[in-house]
Image (spheres, rainbow, N blue to C red):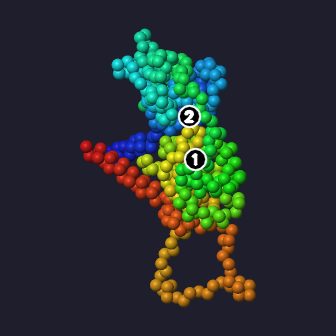
Amino acid sequence: MQLRPLLSLLLLLFFTTATTTTAHNVTRMLAAHPEFSSFNHYLTTTHLASEINSRTTITVLAIDNAAMSELLSKHLSIYSLKNILSLHVLLDYFGAKKLHQITNGTALAATMFQATGTAPGSSGFVNITDLKGGKVGFGAENNGGSLDALFVKSLEEKPYNISVIQISKVLTSDVAEAPTPGPSELNITGIMSAHGCKQFADALLANAEAAKTYEDSVQGGLTVFCPLDDAFKAFYPKYKNFTVANKTAFLEFLAVPVYQSLAMLKSNNGLMNTLATDGARKFDFTVQNEGEEVTLKTKINTVKITGTLIDEQPVAIYTTDKVLLPNELFKAAPTPAPAPAPEEAADSPKPAKKGHKGAPVPDSDADSPADAPEDDAADQTADDNAGVKVGGARFLAMGLSLCLGVLLL
């Protein structure tokens, strides 16, 4: 009789632990420390905050408002500023305790600046050294080995996911501070045309309204999901029959008004608004990933990201194997009707309904969304909840098996 409450307790502990996440929000963490408000603001402005939140193991070297004022007095572009702040984000966990337990007293840590692929040589690494007297020094590896900054204190720690610690001053790096081309110099349609998305680029150039929406969005962040030429050619007859307004909405639907690196897409699964999102007309889609494969999904079809044309903050352009179809412009494929019963099949067909003066009654969906292309109809005919139900059943079975195994020990 005592096994029942014990089993219930084990099940509760199992499911509580299984649903625990390691998500963190660096902006919220720093908001509790107003003396770092400027640093916090520029993490958001440069989109570094979302990249930090997408990582599961990270250390942020925060600098206070006085140190940020000194950096801002250099009047650097927002892109160079992002490179410098990226140098203050380590791709490893260093809490206050670990800083004094570094093997051999020194370590070389990769940074988010290094992860961009634009940092030559070792310029994207930071040297961390445990100094005498309990001090810890930090310095960019390419600045001659000088330890520019010292550890001040720990602000927030969630071992071993994220650590936010204060250092005394900005890490200096000539490479990180070098001028960086702005996004206004990017020719996004030219990039598409040169790398297998010319058909989509031509359609965008031919639509002044959509092209301007793309152009206006580049500065604040833009991610485009560009269908490859063969896919867009097959879809073009449908596109050609759209109204002008629907052509604009469709083109804007294939872009997101924020920068999303591939790593961010892999970690930020879920609904995503687009340039076409407007009130009741949601024009959104769902991002899903399985391992390294990232897919985009609507109720109409599912497409796969097949390549990257450019991924340079604040613009990312990815290729897709098919054209992603918005719910607002297409009808999902109907579920096949069950076969008629034998007695029904034997009945003679019923005559068509007649309207006034015996004329056939036309279909009433002339203004409804178009049917999805036939080759996409099978992508989304299954019940969306089926995978969830199967996964939930397996998860429950695994939990029960674990708990019963513990009881039998």
Please indicate, yes or no, whether residue 200 appears anywhere in the rendered image: yes
Expressed as whole percent of the image width and height from the top left, the position of residue 162 reads 47, 31
Mark 1 / mark 2, whichever is N-terminal:
2
Q: Is residue 293 left or right of residue 202?
A: left
| Residue 18, horizontal then vertical, whole percent | 41, 43
Name, please, the residue furthest toward the front: 194
Q: Residue at x 59, y 68 (%)?
A: 371
Quadrant, the C terminus: top left
* Residue type at numbered disc 2: Leu
Q: Position of residue 182 (x, y in %)?
A: 63, 36
Q: Residue at x 74, y 85 (%)?
A: 356
Q: Whole-percent x and y of residue 385?
A: 49, 58
Under circle 1, the secondary element is helix
Look at the numbered disc 2 and give the secondary structure of its residue. helix
Res. 286 mark = none
Provide the residue designation for mark 2: 48
- Is any part of residue 90 visible from this angle? no
Q: Residue furthest right?
A: 357
Q: In percent of the image, x 47 and y 16: which residue is there?
A: 146
Q: Compared with residue 272, is residue 105 higher up or lower down, i.e. above or below? A: above
The residue under label 1 is 191
Residue placed most toward the observer, 205 or 68: 205
